[in-house]
Amino acid sequence: MIERERIYDHWFAFHAGLTGKKKRELLLFGKTPEQIYHFTYADCRQFFYENEIKRFKETCTLESSKRDIDWLDRNHGWTVFWNEDLYPEKLKQICDYPLGLCVKGKLPVDNRLSIAIVGSRDMSPYGQQAASFFSQELAKSGVQIISGLARGIDGCSHDAALKVGGYTLGVLGCGIDVQYPKSNQYLYEQIEARGGIISEFPIGTTPQPYLFPIRNRIISGISDGVFVIEAKERSGSLITADYALEQNRDVFALTARYYDDLSYGCLNLIEHGAKPVYRLENITEEYKNNYEFCTKLTNSKNFSLAKKEKLVYDCLRLEPKGIDQIVAECKLSVGEVLTILTMLELKQYIIQTQNNYYRIKE
């Protein structure tokens, strides 16, 4: 794309004073960003309501776009627009896709599975452990981990994927030049170097509460499925899950503890049809026919487990279980269960957290 066209595309995507819906309507009419930029008042009356014209005309300047492009050039950033081959195919499928993205690092690969992992900013130790475990195991299998680079579950998921050399993408609710929250600055730098960061907002956009629900549609839109780890009854993560349903994406929720406030959102999702997750295969089995690499992961532990070993292993979760509960659920003798647990520990599939309490190993 020539530089002249790119400036007008940047203006149209990031700075034109029009709603996304109006922009897409103009494109359907065959108008180019350069033509729209030069609309006369007569043109405006043909396509806009009166209350839209003033705001539109006030934004008809290329100065902000030039400043954005200059910042991106100086800071190893780049842009991708709706009409380019590099634009993510999954994102283009949603009805309100952003017309442009500012990018640092790399975009996800279209033909690889992408799972969004989201959850509470004030995560519990259980949620932190679950986010780390599932993100690492998915990333090791080649799954691309998508999240919002917020503190809590988001940051934990990004960090876990990076630790095993996986790809992770952070979707910002501010300009790509703003590292928010400050506590995740190291993650921002690591993801920029080894994954990708994107934003649909212009350079210099500061974090505002109303921007985060808007960006959530991109988190779900660029993913094949959304996995909610922890969420209260009213949570931004549930907004992402709602977007996922609207976009015909899969929704997964961690099986959680009924007495925990941070579990109510997940329990509600499961009650309304989200797929409960208590082991990795609950996610990967959904995609084994579409993504070959997932079949390599699915049931990977089963090949070295005898029938009763698998029975005991499948009974365990991230949260420790006592020996009495394991015996009751597996309907085996205490001696058999203790022997099997010892073997599973030796194979490094489980760990004993305290006397006679066991959980699966991360």
Image (cartoon, rainbow, N blue to C red):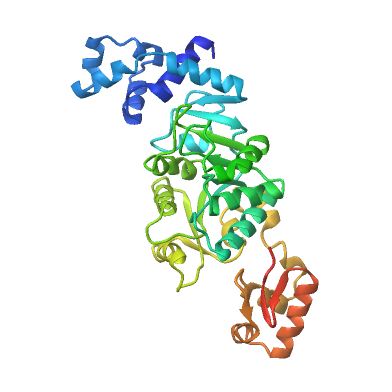
Q: Is residue 78 left or right of residue 219?
A: right
83 relative to 200, above or below: above
What x and y, as percent, mark residue 309?
A: 72, 76
10 relative to 116, above or below: above
What x and y, as percent, mark residue 70?
A: 54, 17
Residue farthest toward the left in the current orientation of the protein: 50
361 relative to 215, above or below: below
Residue at x-position 63% and y-position 35%: 192
Residue at x-position 62% and y-position 43%: 187
User: Within the image, what quadrant is residue 144 found in?
Assistant: top right
What x and y, as percent, mark residue 136?
A: 66, 54
Residue at x-position 39% and y-position 22%: 15
Camera sees residue 241:
yes
Camera sees residue 292:
no
* Figure label count: 0
Q: Nearer the viewer, residue 113 or 321?
A: 321
Looking at the rendering, in which quadrant would you find the N terminus? top right
User: Within the image, what quadrant is residue 295 found in?
Assistant: bottom right
What x and y, as percent, mark residue 331?
A: 62, 87
Q: Nearer the viewer, residue 174 or 270?
A: 174
Looking at the rendering, in which quadrant would you find the C terminus? bottom right
45 relative to 197, above or below: above
Residue farthest toward the front in the current orientation of the protein: 182
Residue at x-position 72% and y-position 65%: 301
Residue farthest toward the right in the current orientation of the protein: 346
